[in-house]
Image: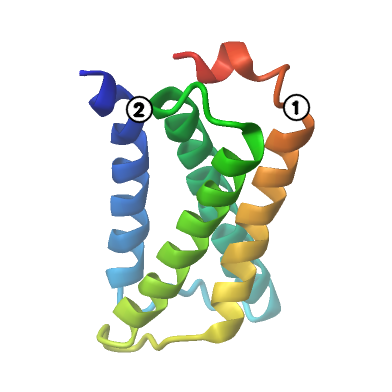
């Protein structure tokens, strides 16, 4: 049960990202605003994934030192971003993009940096 409460949110969020990546053409037709909205969504998706990974890492390995949990969480989010782009290579109307991996990774990095700065303050939040 502890594993499910720790890793369940990670798996659900990764599943949502996978589902959204399976949609052939995600576009609003708003030109530049569409591009900014989609890239902002990429950053947000992977920032949340990184937060869930940090939470799961802290709950699974509570005695692990902070840099280990943060680095592994960032690595996991970046690895998933790369695998997601490979997945998009097989979706009609979509394609892989190194730029998207960088955008996804920047969202994850921002979340991990935030967690590093707020490590002690977020103990209560990540406890649940």
Residue closer to the observer: 95 or 5? 5
With respect to residue 32, does 62 lie above or below? above
Q: Are marks 2 and 1 in contact (CB under 8 Å)?
A: no
Query: Left or right: 83 with respect to 112?
Result: left
Mark 1 neighbour density, 10 Å: few (under 14) some (14–19) many (20 or more)? few
Q: Quadrant of the C terminus?
A: top left
With respect to residue 93, does 10 lie above or below? above
Residue 35's spot in the image, x, y percent?
63, 75
Residue closer to the observer: 79 or 98? 79
Residue 124's spot in the image, x, y percent?
59, 11
Residue 106's spot in the image, x, y percent?
67, 62
Q: Secondary structure at mark 2?
A: helix
Per the rendering, the mark at residue 6 is: 2
Query: Left or right: 89 with respect to 57?
Result: left
Q: Which residue is mark 1?
A: 118
**Residue extending farthest top:** 124
Q: Quadrant of the N terminus?
A: top left
Mark 2 neighbour density, 10 Å: few (under 14) some (14–19) many (20 or more)? many
With respect to residue 64, does 71 lie above or below? below
Residue closer to the observer: 45 or 8? 8
Query: Left or right: 120 with respect to 60?
Result: right
Q: Residue at x 61, y 54 (%)?
A: 108
Q: Residue at x 27, y 83 (%)?
A: 91
Q: What is the quadrant of residue 83 in the picture?
A: bottom left
Residue 21's spot in the image, x, y percent?
35, 69
Residue closer to the observer: 30 or 79? 79
Q: Secondary structure at mark 1?
A: loop
**Residue extending farthest right:** 117
Q: What is the quadrant of residue 10 in the picture?
A: top left
């Amino acid at each position: 049960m502890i594993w499910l409460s720790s890793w369940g949110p990670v798996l659900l969020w990764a599943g949502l990202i996978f589902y959204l990546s399976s949609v052939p053409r995600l576009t609003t037709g708003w030109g530049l605003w569409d591009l900014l909205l989609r890239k902002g969504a990429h950053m947000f998706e992977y920032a949340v994934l990184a937060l869930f990974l940090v939470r799961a890492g802290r709950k699974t390995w509570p005695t692990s030192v902070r840099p280990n949990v943060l680095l592994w969480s960032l690595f996991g989010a970046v690895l998933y971003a790369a695998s997601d782009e490979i997945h998009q290579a097989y979706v009609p109307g979509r394609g892989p993009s190194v730029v998207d991996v960088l955008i996804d990774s920047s969202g994850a990095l921002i979340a991990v940096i935030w967690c590093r700065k707020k490590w002690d303050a977020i103990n209560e939040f990540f406890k649940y």
